[in-house]
Amino acid sequence: MSAEIGGGNPDADGGPVRHIPVLLSEVIEALQPRPGQVILDGTFGAGGYTSAILDRGASVIALDRDPSAIEAGQALVAASGGRLSLIHAQFSDLARHAPPGGLDGVVLDIGVSSMQLDEAERGFSFQKNGPLDMRMSSAGVSAADVVNRAKVTDLIRIFGFLGEEKQAGRIARAIEKRRAEQPFATTRDLAGLIEIVTPRKAKDKIHPATRVFQALRIFVNDELGELARALFAAERVLKPGGRLVVVSFHSLEDRIVKKFFQDRSGRTTGSRHLPELIKRDVIFAPVGKSMIAASEEEAAANPRARSAKLRAGKRTTAPSGADDLSIFDLPELATLEKIGG
């Protein structure tokens, strides 16, 4: 799961997506890799960040849940002189793959990769017709399973929360009516129905199906839950002074990262239900600005970088905090886990 090309609008109109690492110089500046260090790249993708880290002399443990990315990365493994270990795994399991002495850095870029978008058979984009799949790991429940089997109320929650789709109810009810006659099987099949139910207006910058496809992808791959668990895992395995760098592309992803660093900074406020200031140990000290966005030049060269946000922190000697999802103040996460179960 890599956002080498960004993850803001993976189905926006346009041609094939090129592999362009987003915020590459900013990521390296925040990580500060050097010889002798071990950095974990939890979202290998096409290897953009990993290559840059290797170039600076550090060793890399890279993870990716997509078997295609692991296969494609073997040439880089062979060229690394033994400094790259590439593992088929979800980044929420990164603690299992950290060395006994801990890590000097962890980098995560959250989104969908250019390779996944370009392969029609993966079903991530409706620009190319293919099976309604969207599974990054090529296993488990597919987008077609969700669309054809989920309750209408659950579809509304998925589209409304994860896709921020204002017409979630109308689209979900239209899906229920249509699937009773014929199940959805392809990306164009679903996109076509959505376009009929919510026609594209002249002022619209994206296709009417963009938000629904985004929501299905995030749900099928449990992307928000994966991110939350990865942040907690990184906290446990980073050495004092180790750096955690996260690039996100979706408002909910960025909210999770922001809330995490806020909670671990020692000066966080409570939730909307408990707004008073809560004093905590400083587990992560800030690195640079609280948030870094892509420059105008990068956004112009790579439209998918427009929504990219980088946040980073340096691990202190304080004990790790609890793996408490409530710090993100997103009760919808529990609801989605129930739907997924």
Image (cartoon, helix red, strand yellow):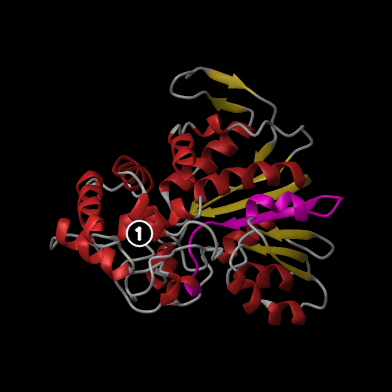
For the N terminus, which image quadrant?
A: bottom right
Question: In which quarter of the view is residue 35 placed?
Answer: bottom right
- Can residue 178 be found in the magenta stretch? no
Residue 63, picture quadrant: bottom right
Residue appearing at x 59%, y 38% in the figure: 261
For the residue pair 2 and 188, the one nearer the viewer reads as 188
Q: Residue at x 44, y 45 (%)?
A: 252
280 versus 16 height, above or below? above
Q: Position of residue 291 (x, y in %)?
A: 51, 47
Q: Categorize mark 1 by other alpha carbons within 10 Å: few (<14), some (14-19), many (20+).
A: many
Is residue 31 among what the camera can see?
Answer: yes
Task: Give x and y (percent) for residue 41.
Answer: 67, 61
Amino acid tagged 1: Phe
Which residue position is annotated with label 1?
Answer: 213
Residue 20, percent from left and from top:
50, 73
Q: Please name the residue shown 49% across and 62% down the image.
A: 135
Residue located 13% across and 60% down the image:
201
Towards the viewer: 285 or 113: 113
Residue range corresponding to the magenta coloring = 91-115
Per the image, label 1 sits on a secondary structure element best described as: helix
Q: Which residue is outermost to the front?
A: 181
- 112 part of magenta stretch: yes
Residue 331 percent location from the top left of the image: 45, 31
Can residue 199 be seen here? The reply is no
Q: Nearer the viewer, residue 81 or 28?
A: 81
